[in-house]
Image (spheres, rainbow, N blue to C red):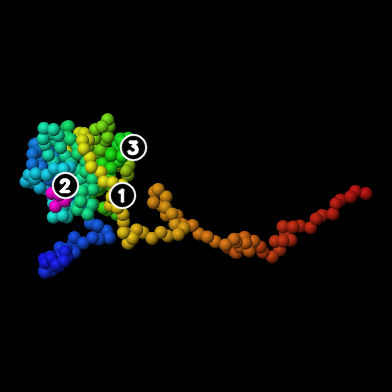
């Protein structure tokens, strides 16, 4: 590739395809996550990063070497890694005396940090500690958020949006019942956030709809909120802006209800129902002589003289 006036020009077809894959698109592809290990990590943090990577595969990049990065002080290294691997989501793990067992969830916009949240691990159960069957790689999870804080507190609302962006998986047009195999449950209670991972088991129920049971398969976390960096309202609004080509054209007199049922409204002129042509049936058609039979002549009153 050659640089001329700030514009990168490809020399080979391979570099041309690479630049085309990095160009902005109307409908972006699946978001990729980078999982980075800090300069100082504990065994808990290292195993937690591996477990999250196992849930995110194959849409994740794991950095096995240590990186001296401080996201809240200087995010240039994270922005460099994001541009290099074309990742818009990141998870950073570190450990020190002041903030032990630390995980930082964050996301990028235009290869710059949009928002990030620092969560401390108080209790952790890894995948290898739970001796149960696991979900296949690349399974799209079902996300459940419970707790009043996710609805009322602005910081927890933004965290819920970030976790949804991080764990949502690929976009699908339809869902089949047998494909719902993995559930991620987040609960916010008393300043703590509990993350649980379950496998869905479909049992026989004696009818067409199966009976559903949830089996803990790990990992499970007990988080506590520490630091946060949230984007301004203007930048957050800009990051959610959609191009005109993506927005569907609004059709007149068509609406949908909460279940997706389509309703249409028709505008018609006022009709004269007296001249309405109805369907003719042979059974209702009058025959000859029926008028005289149905209406016999009135008999003269009898008088006795």
In this view of the protein, which residue sits in the foreground, 170 or 71? 71
Q: Quadrant of residue 220?
A: top left
Residue drawn at (27%, 60%) of the image: 26
Q: Quadrant of residue 150?
A: top left
Numbered range of the magenta stretch:
75-80
Instruction: Indicate yes or no whether the magenta region holds residue 26.
Output: no
For marks 3 and 1 on the same chain, the one whose residue lies earlier in the sequence: 3
Considering every residue shown, the one lying at the far left of the view is: 65
Marking on residue 234: 1
Q: CA distance from mark 2 to mark 1?
A: 20 Å
The reply to whether residue 300 is visible in this rendering is yes
Residue 113 location in percent, x, y?
A: 21, 48
Q: CA distance from mark 3 to mark 2?
A: 29 Å
Residue drawn at (16%, 47%) of the image: 75
Question: In the rendered structure, are the residues bearing label 3 and label 2 in contact, judged by CB atoms less than 8 Å apart?
Answer: no
Disc 3 target residue: 152
Q: Helix or strand or loop: what does disc 1 sit on?
A: helix
In this view of the protein, which residue sits in the foreground, 237 or 212? 237
Question: In the rendered structure, are the residues bearing label 3 and label 1 in contact, judged by CB atoms less than 8 Å apart?
Answer: no
Q: Pointer 2: residues within 10 angstroms few (<14), some, or many (20+)?
A: few
- Give the quarter of the figure containing the N terminus: bottom left
Tell me how many marks there are: 3
For marks 3 and 2 on the same chain, the one whose residue lies earlier in the sequence: 2
Residue 71 location in percent, x, y?
A: 16, 44
Residue 305 location in percent, x, y?
A: 93, 49
Considering every residue shown, the one lying at the far right of the view is: 305
Q: Pointer 3: residues within 10 angstroms few (<14), some, or many (20+)?
A: few
For marks 2 and 1 on the same chain, the one whose residue lies earlier in the sequence: 2
Q: Pointer 1: residues within 10 angstroms few (<14), some, or many (20+)?
A: few
Residue 283 location in percent, x, y?
A: 60, 61
Marking on residue 75: 2
């Amino acid at each position: 590739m050659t640089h001329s006036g700030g514009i990168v020009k490809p020399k080979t077809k391979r570099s041309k395809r690479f630049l085309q894959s990095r160009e902005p698109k109307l409908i972006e592809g699946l978001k990729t996550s980078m999982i980075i290990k800090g300069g100082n990590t504990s065994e808990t943090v290292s195993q937690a990063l591996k477990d999250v990577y196992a849930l995110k595969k194959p849409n994740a990049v794991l950095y096995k070497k240590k990186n001296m990065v401080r996201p809240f002080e200087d995010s240039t290294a994270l922005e460099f890694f994001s541009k290099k691997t074309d990742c818009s989501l990141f998870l950073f793990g570190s450990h020190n005396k002041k903030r032990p067992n630390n995980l930082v969830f964050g996301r990028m916009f235009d290869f710059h940090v949009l928002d990030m949240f620092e969560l401390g691990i108080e209790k952790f159960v890894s995948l290898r500690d739970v001796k149960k069957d696991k979900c296949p790689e690349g399974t799209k999870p079902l996300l459940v958020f419970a707790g009043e804080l996710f609805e009322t507190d602005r910081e927890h609302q933004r965290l819920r949006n970030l976790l949804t962006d991080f764990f949502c998986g690929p976009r699908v047009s339809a869902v089949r019942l047998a494909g719902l195999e993995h559930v991620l449950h987040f609960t916010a209670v008393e300043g703590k956030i509990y993350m649980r991972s379950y496998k869905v088991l479909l049992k026989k129920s004696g009818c067409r709809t199966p009976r559903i049971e949830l089996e803990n398969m790990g990992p499970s976390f007990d988080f506590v909120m520490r630091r946060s960096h949230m984007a301004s309202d203007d930048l957050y609004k800009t990051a959610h802006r959609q191009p005109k080509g993506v927005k569907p054209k609004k059709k007149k007199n068509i609406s949908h209800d909460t279940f997706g049922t389509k309703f249409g409204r028709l505008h018609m002129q006022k009709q004269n129902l007296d001249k309405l042509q109805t369907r003719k049936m042979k059974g209702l058609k009058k025959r000859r002589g029926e008028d005289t039979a149905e209406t016999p002549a009135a008999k003269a009153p009898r008088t006795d003289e």
